[in-house]
Image: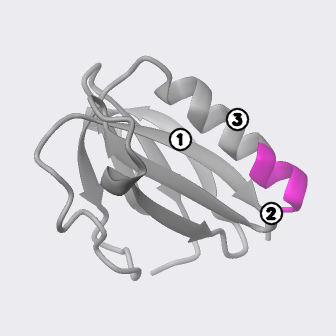
Amino acid sequence: MPEIAEIHSFASSINEWASNVAITSIHRGRTAKGPDFSIGLPLARWSIFASARGKELAIDISPATSDTKADRVTVTFTHGLVGQWQRHPRSAIPVFCQVAFLTATDEAICFIDAMVR
């Protein structure tokens, strides 16, 4: 299981990767077991911001054109034994990707957990 310092590192990396990039869609992997949180999100471009909360990582998803908290959705990730965040080209999303935030620049910010089958 990732330690608290690793969770902070994941949050920092996600925020760096997502700065000045619009999220155009959310891809839920075929091995994902959590809830499908893409339902109910507005049809727009989004921005994401990650923050560490102990051994969990919270990602705030909000429309790129809005600064109000009312439009924001927060999703919390627990990382299991080997969960980690990686950046990949859209065309090469790993098999064990649980969720991927697809960007307008054809990249994906992916939550990978190879232990989930």
User: What residue did someone put label 2 on?
Assistant: 2
Which residue is drawn at the image coordinates 53% and 41% (left, top)? Answer: 49
Which element is circle 1 on?
A: strand
> In the rendered view, would you say 80 is above or below 96?
below
Q: Report the side of 82 relative to 66 (left or right).
A: right
Q: Are marks 2 and 1 in contact (CB under 8 Å)?
A: no
Residue 31, label in figure: none
Front residue of this view, candidates 66 and 25: 66
State which mark lies toward you, 3 or 1: 1
The residues tagged by marks 2 and 3 sit, at their Cα atoms, a distance apart of 15 Å
Residue drawn at x 36%, y 74% as measured from the top left: 31
Residue 81 against residue 64 in the figure, above or below: below
Residue extent of the magenta highlight: 3-8
Identified by mark 3, the residue type is Ser
What's the distance in space between the residues labelled 3 and 1, CA to CA?
A: 9 Å
Q: Nearer the viewer, mark 2 or mark 1?
A: 1
Could you tell which of marks 2 and 1 lies nearer the N-terminus? 2
- In depth, the one of 55 and 115 nearer the eye is 55
For residue 49, the mark is 1
Which residue was labeled with disc 3? 12
Question: Magenta stretch mostly in which secondary structure?
Answer: helix
